Image (spheres, helix red, strand yellow):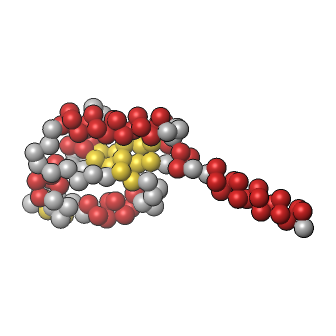
Amino acid sequence: MKIILSALILLSFTNCTTKEVDAQHLFYLHGRIIELQGIQAVSPQFGPYEYEKIIDSLRTITSNIHAEVRKDPVDFFAFCTRVSGEIDRLISEGVEPQNITVLGASKGAVMAIS
């Protein structure tokens, strides 16, 4: 009985120490067409953006998706500074930098490297 109780306590302790800090975090920065047309955006040249499918697909990697829909007009540098601040906050809370990915498309890619 002591062994079972010890195992249950150990399992409970293990679950308590598995924190969000150990999880993967993915920031997705969409293209400018979403700013202009919203998440149902359609490009005459490339077709539907399929924002929701992109986010759903990224959820197969991690449930910690950070994906804010920007609306025109966007202050480019203020937005980048805010995302950078969110990343700094995660790191200060103990998330390892290698557990944070920033992914961007089109204008979002330029923001991701800024």
Give the image quarter of residue 53.
bottom left
Give the image quarter of residue 37.
bottom left
Residue ID at (16%, 48%): 32
**Residue 79, position as x, y percentages in the image:** 23, 39
Residue ID at (36%, 47%): 27
Residue ID at (40%, 57%): 58
Left or right: 66, with 69 as reference point = right
**Residue 102, position as x, y percentages in the image:** 37, 42
Residue lying at the far bottom of the rendered structure: 1
**Residue 39, position as x, y percentages in the image:** 20, 61
Q: Is residue 96 above or below residue 37?
A: above
Q: Is residue 98 visible?
A: no
Residue ID at (34%, 59%): 55
Q: Quadrant of the C terminus?
A: top left
Q: Is residue 69 visible?
A: yes
Left or right: 26, with 39 as reference point = right
Q: Quadrant of the N terminus?
A: bottom right
In this view, the residue in front, 4 or 23, is 4
In this view, the residue in front, 18 or 61, is 18
How many numbered markers are drawn? 0
**Residue 25, position as x, y percentages in the image:** 44, 48
